[in-house]
Image (spheres, rainbow, N blue to C red):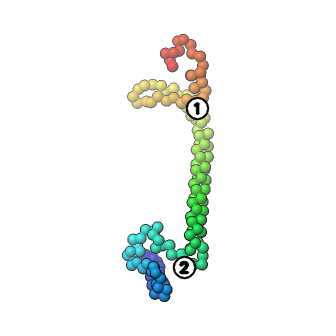
Amino acid sequence: MKLMKAKWTAYTFRANNYNSTFSPEIELATPCFEEVQELEMDEPFWTIGSLDHPGEPWATNLNTQKGIQAYLHISHCHDEMTQISREARQAVKLAIQQTPKLLMLSDNSQLGTSSSNQFQFDVITEKSFKQKYTEPMSPHSCNNA
């Protein structure tokens, strides 16, 4: 809070000095400290680069500012895509690692009981799907399907 108060004091001094020296049509705002504390971060008050760096294009040129914003947006999108691709690789790796366990579970467990405390568990693999739905059935197997 102490640093913010010092920055506000310095700004107020410079803004008052600017307003009295140059008498601009639109004077720089000099809000009281309590008002500054309540300002949101996207308020124009916080963007005073044109006063500190009047010769720098990033502070005064609107197209340069838009270009910087566009670059930041693209950079953030690139970071997001990197994160998404990392997560996708991890998901595929996990799926490959878990496949043998799931296949073993599928082959070894026949929990087709219907008691209220257990759930029916049936993992369909390509092999079991083909066996169940594509191989010809005998006339007596219709009731089992």
Query: Is 92 above or below relative to 79?
Result: above
Residue 23 in the image, given as x and y percentages of width and height: 47, 85
Q: Position of residue 37 (x, y in %)?
A: 40, 73
The kind of secondary structure element at disc 1 is helix
Q: Amino acid at mark 1?
A: Leu
The residue singled out by tag 2 in the image is 52
In this rendering, which labeled residue sits more in front, label 2 or label 1?
2
Residue 134 seen in the figure: yes
Residue 10 makes an appearance in the image: no
Task: Give the camera-side residue of 126 and 36.
Answer: 36
Q: Residue at x 58, y 68 (%)?
A: 63
The first of marks 2 and 1 along the sequence is: 2
- Total label count? 2
Quadrant in the rendering for residue 99: top right
Image coordinates for residue 38, horizontal then vertical, percent: 39, 71
| SS class, disc 2 | helix
Above or below: residue 84 compared with residue 18: above
Location of residue 84 with respect to 1 vertically, above or below: above
Q: Say which quarter of the image contains residue 130.
A: top right
Q: CA distance from mark 2 to mark 1?
A: 67 Å
Residue with the most extreme top position: 139
Q: Which residue is mark 1?
A: 103
Determine crowd level at label 2: few under 14, some 14-19, many 20+ residues with C-alpha closer than 10 A: few
Disc 2 marks a residue whose amino acid type is: Asp
